[in-house]
Image: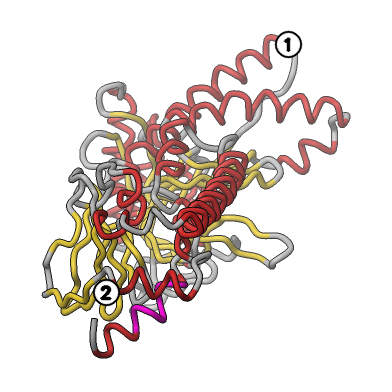
Amino acid sequence: MRGDGAKLAKKLLPQVAMLSFLSPGEIQALSQRGEILSVNDGDVLIAEGAVGNTLFLVLRGKVAISRDGFRLAVSEMGSVVGEISLVDSGKATATVTAIGPVMVFRISRENFETLYSNKNFVRAILKGLAAKTREAIDRDVGNLHRIEGLRDTFGRYVSKAVLDDILSSSDPESLLSGRLANATIFFSDIRNFTTFSEHLPAADMICLLRDYFGRMVPLVTKHNGYINKFIGDALLVLFNLPVAYSNSAIEAVQTAIEMSQSLDEMNADRRDRGKPAISIGIGIHAGEVIAGNIGSVERMEYTVIGDNVNLCSRLEGLTKHYGVRVLISEDLREKIGQHFLIRAIDLVIVQGRQKPTRIYELCGTISSARDIEVSVCRQYEEVLNLYFARRWRDCIKKISKSKLLAIDNPSNVLRNRCEFFLKEPPSENWNCAFAMGEK
């Protein structure tokens, strides 16, 4: 061997784990049995599945390590590939390909084995392989601990399918790092729970929440939602995070419908036992969020932040104002197609935002909708258009004449607002949006 390549090989060979216990003389002997090669971009040094018979030490440039067509890593100067197959004659577990021009030191099994007559050489190689094995075991144990930590973190709050996707990722922890991501955000809350709980003994309140969450949580995990937080009696659920799923918006909406049905069953059971019914509000929105582990070194949690999270929280809060159970955003409505019965409720400016937001009530699935529900949606759309056209008297008259709208909560909100505007009209440049003064 001649030139800079030979010098680099002698310098880098002792840094190879398997060769780290060789003496300077043994390194010299080994280097004399190899050769320096220059390879071009795309050249394959080792083919996955082929019987290994060569060790390569990267002297300059980079090589890609891939398996089943997927790139696993990129190795640079000082990296060695093929060393295990060189000893056991096994098949290569990955393909090694040059990235750009690469210089390597290569030694074949035949030339390597000529040194086996030196017992010190064999002993040093065994020590090196033992050290490499210990390193691999320590790394695997560390990975197992991390995986168990992830399993503990997410296992109680996600479906088995989502958990398996997290743990099968080549780098599961990267899913939890800070990043921009698209998500369907889902807030639910028991209305007036603070006031409600003031009249309950602590044991009864815990029993109520256990019954409530015991019914609702399985519905969330059934539809691949991730329960990000329990906030007292409230739930923050994420769909499409931490792993992406198709139809996450539909899954979120279906969760809301089934939660509503389950609440009706729970309240029927409570009434049978002489206990008061409870009400919930649900807000669902789809948009970009900042997702990741947030907190300090001492305590961190995986969560989401951003304007879209805040908007979803406002939607949930508005369910109380309009007297409906589920409100969704326009962004979500556009994603769920024609499968659900949805009615436009209002155009509002929520606290913390300047841009008006169109809000909609999720009434159920099209296939299960009753004629009376479809009629309410149609009639409400007509009075909402009168309201936006500043025809407030006509709006009030139409609501009052309709037996369905007269007992409809959003219609009564609209009628009260029309009566207010008749006394104190908005400005001529009114954009039809109503500014909400509360969260």
Position of the N terminus by quadrant: bottom left
**Bounds of the magenta span?**
8-14
Q: Judge whether residue 11 is colored magenta.
A: yes
Residue 402: image x %, image y %?
36, 34
Report if the CB atoms under discs 2 and 1 are less than 8 Å apart.
Answer: no
- Which residue is located at x 26 percent, y 79 percent? 61
Q: What element carries label 1?
A: loop
Nearer-the-camera pick, 339 or 4? 4
One can see residue 396 in this view:
no
Q: In this view, does 143 lie to the left or right of 98?
A: right
Farthest-out residue, right: 201
- Which residue is located at x 30 percent, y 78 percent? 59
Residue 288: image x %, image y %?
38, 62
Q: Quadrant of residue 157?
A: top right
Residue 289: image x %, image y %?
44, 63
Q: Nearer the viewer, mark 2 or mark 1?
A: 2
Which colouring convention does the figure follow? secondary structure
- Which residue is located at x 40 percent, y 40 percent? 165
Residue with the mark numbered 1: 273
Farthest-out residue, bottom: 3
Nearer-the-camera pick, 127 or 33? 33
Residue with the mark numbered 2: 62
